[in-house]
Image (cartoon, rainbow, N blue to C red):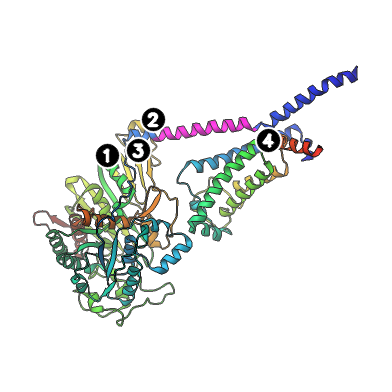
Amino acid sequence: MRNNKTYTTVQLVTLVALRFLIGWHLLYEGFSKLLSPNWTSAGFLKESQWIMAGFSQWVISNSGVLNVVDFLNTWGLIAIGVGLIMGLCTRTAAIAGALLLFMYYLNNAPIIGIEYSIPSEGDYLIISKTLIEAVALFALAVFPTGSIIGLDAIITRIKGKKDIK
Amino acid sequence: MAKDKGQTQQPEEKNSQSRRTMLKALAGIPVLGVFAYELMEKRSYDQLKKTRLIKELGLDDIPAPTKITNAGKGDLLRIGVIGFGNRAVNLAKGLGFMHPDNIKEGRKNGSLDDWLAQENLNVAITGVCDVFDLHAENGLAIARNEAQTGGAKPSGLPVKRYRTYQELLQDDSIDAVVIATPDHHHSRITVDAVEAGKHVYCEKSICVTEDELYRVYDAVKNSDRVFQLGHQITQNVVFQQAKEVIKKDILGKITLIETTTNRNTASGAWIRHLDANGNPKPGSLKTIDWAQWLGDRPKVPFTIDRYYNWTKFFAYDTGMLGQLFSHEYDAVNQLLRIGIPKSVVASGGIYYWKDNREIPDLLQAVFEYPERDLTLLYSASLANSRQRGRVFMGHDASMELGGSLSITADFDSTRYKKKIEEGVIDTNSPMITVSPGSGKIDAVTSATEKYYASRGLTSTMINGRRVDVTHLHLREWINCIRNGGETSANIERAFEEGATIMMANKSYREKRRVEWDPVLRKIV
C-alpha cells in the first residue's frame, strides 16, 4: 500500500493491537484443536440449523470430507494467527480469517427461533462476537498495517527495490 | 557546510531508517514468543492437574485399550442363524457379513472403513432359518455375500435355508448357532441346540418364564458347549476402565445404583408394524409360518401387530425388563458381581401407550442386596426421554457409565475432603472423564440406535479405530469355542440375570414383594 504513511501513531497502534489480539485468539483456537487428539468439528457442525445446515450435514456424514475439514480448520487457524501476529501476508490472512469466522457465524447464528444445544457464553440477538470478530478482521484487511509493522514491510521493500530497478 | 553535513549524515540516516524498518517488520516476534511461552505454561498446568489427580487416585496404571489379537486362527466355523430380523442383520455384520446393497451404499458414503478393517473371524454362515420368507431371503443374501472384512477370502460354501430350527439343528455340518428370534423361543431353542451339540450365542433375554430359566440352565450346565448371552456392553473399552475404577475403590462404599430407561417414541415403545409412510409392513399368513412363530405359546390368530410388536405381550416377552433392564443389570453385574437379589419390589402400569399392550410402559423396580448393603434401582419410562443415565453412587464419588464414563467426587466425601478443600478436586464437575472419543462418525440414524450408542452398546474405540462391540462379543464366543475358556456372559451370569428379571416380572404381575430362596434356588 502506498498510502500507509497516512496513519497517525494512535491509529497505527490501535490497528496493530487489534491485529495482535485477534491473531492471538485464532492461533490458540488452532493450537487447542491440534493438541486435543480427539477433537473434531462434527459436534459443532451437528448444531448447524440455518442456511449452512445442509452443507454441514454432508460434511459430517462423509468421514473423508470431515477429516479434510478438521485438518484445514486447525491449520488454517494456526496459519491465519501467525500471519496476523507476524504481519505476514496480512491482508490475505485477515480476509481468510474473516471468511472462516463468518462460516462459524453462519453455522451458529443467534437467529430468532433457532435454538442450539451447546450454550453460548453470552447473550446474543442476531449479532454474535464471532460476527463482530469477522468484521473486525475485514476492517484490518481494509486498513492494512502489515507493511508498516510486520514482515510485509520487508516484502514490500524487496518488491519496491525490484520495481525501481 | 550545510551541504557537507547533509552529505555525511545521509548514509547514517538511511541506515537507522532501515534498522527501524527491520525492527518494525519483526515486531510480531515478541508477541509470538509470549504466546509460545503461555502455551507451554497452559499445557504443563493442564498436564500437572491431570497427572496429580490421576496419581492421587492411583489410576496412572489403568490398562489402555488392548490390541485386538487374532481370533480367526483355527478351522472354519460353520454357523447357523435362527431368526433373521433386524438384530440378526447386526450380528451378521459383527461376524463379517453384510447385504450387497448395504455394502454398495456404505462404500459410497465412506462409512464402511471401520467395518472393512474388522478382523476376519474365519466363519461361514451356512444355515439360515426364519419363519418369515422376507427375512429368510434377506438372510440368505447376507450369508451368501460372505466375509468381506479383514481381507477374508470367501469359503465358497453353500448357504441353505431351513424351514424349521429343528431341521437346522439336525444338520451335523453346522458347528454353532446364533439365536435372534423373539424371546419366547430363546430358551427352548438353546436347550435343543446344546443337546444337538451346537455352541450357542443367544440374544437376551434368556427366558420369559421361570420354568424356561431352570430348564435352559440345566441343559447348558450339563453340556460342554460354549454359551454366550448377547450382552455386548462389557466389550466396551470404557467398561474395562470402569472395572478398574471399581477395583481401585475410587467411589468408596457403593450403596445405591440407579439405572434407567428413557424413551419416548412409538418405535421405542415397540410399536413397529408400520413403515415410514404409515402403511403396514410386509407379512401375511402366506409368507409367515404362524404356527411355528407361536411355538409352544397359546394358539391365537395372526395379526401384523402381534408379529412385529410381540414385545407388548407377556406370552412372548417381559417388556422393558427383558429388553432393556437386562442390559442395565448385566452392566452392573459384570462390574460388581451382585448376583441374584434377596428381594424385589416392582410397580408401574400402562400410563401412556393405551393400545392393546399387556406390558407396562412405566415401571420402577427396587432390587435389594442386604448382604452387600446395596440397592439397585431401575426406573423406566416409555413416555419421556430425559436422559437420566446409569449412576453408581458411593460415599466418596458417583460414577456415570454409558458410552463414556465420568466420575464426580461427592461434596461430603471423607476420602477427598482435603483435596476438595485445597481446590484440587471440584465437586461441581467430573474429576475424571473417559471418553472413547470419536475421530470418525458413522451413520447413527434412528432414535433407538442413538439410545444404544449413548449407553455404550454399539461401538467402542480401540487404537483409534471404531470397533463394533457386537463383533467383539461374538469374537469372544468364537475364541472360547476354538481355544476354550469362559465367555463373559456365560450361563451363570445368564441365570443370575434371568432370575432377577423373573423376580421383578413376578412382583409386577402379582403386585407383591418377592424373595429369592438361595437354597431351593426358586422365587418365593
Classify mark 1: residues with Cα within 10 Å, few (<14), some (14-19) or many (20+): some
From the top left corner, tell me how far across and down residue B430 is, in percent: 38, 42
CA–CA distance in space, label 3 to label 2: 13 Å
Q: Is residue B30 magenta?
A: yes
Write the residue at 19% across / 49% down: B369
Circle 2 sits in a helix, a strand or a loop, which is it? helix
Upstream in sequence: badge 1 or badge 3? 1
**Which residue is more in the foreground, B205 or B345?**
B205
Identify the residue under disc 2. Answer: B422
Upstream in sequence: badge 3 or badge 2? 3
From the top left corner, tell me how far across and down residue B509 is, in percent: 21, 65
- Same subunit under labels 1 and 3? yes
Q: Quadrant of the C terminus of chain B?
A: bottom left
Write the residue at 29% across / 66% down: B125
Upstream in sequence: badge 2 or badge 1? 1
Any mark on residue A151, and which? 4
Any mark on residue B411, and which? 3
Q: Chain of mark 3?
A: B
Give the residue at the far left of this rendering: B519
Any mark on residue B249, and which? 1
**Which residue is more in the foreground, B467 or B524?**
B467
CA–CA distance in space, label 1 to label 4: 58 Å
Q: Amino acid at mark 3?
A: Phe
Write the residue at 66% across / 31% down: B27
Q: Which residues are magenta?
A: B28-50
Q: Nearer the viewer, mark 3 or mark 2?
A: 2
Quarter of the rendering containing residue A25 = top right
CA–CA distance in space, label 4 to label 2: 47 Å
Q: Chain of mark 4?
A: A
Q: Nearer the viewer, mark 2 or mark 1?
A: 1
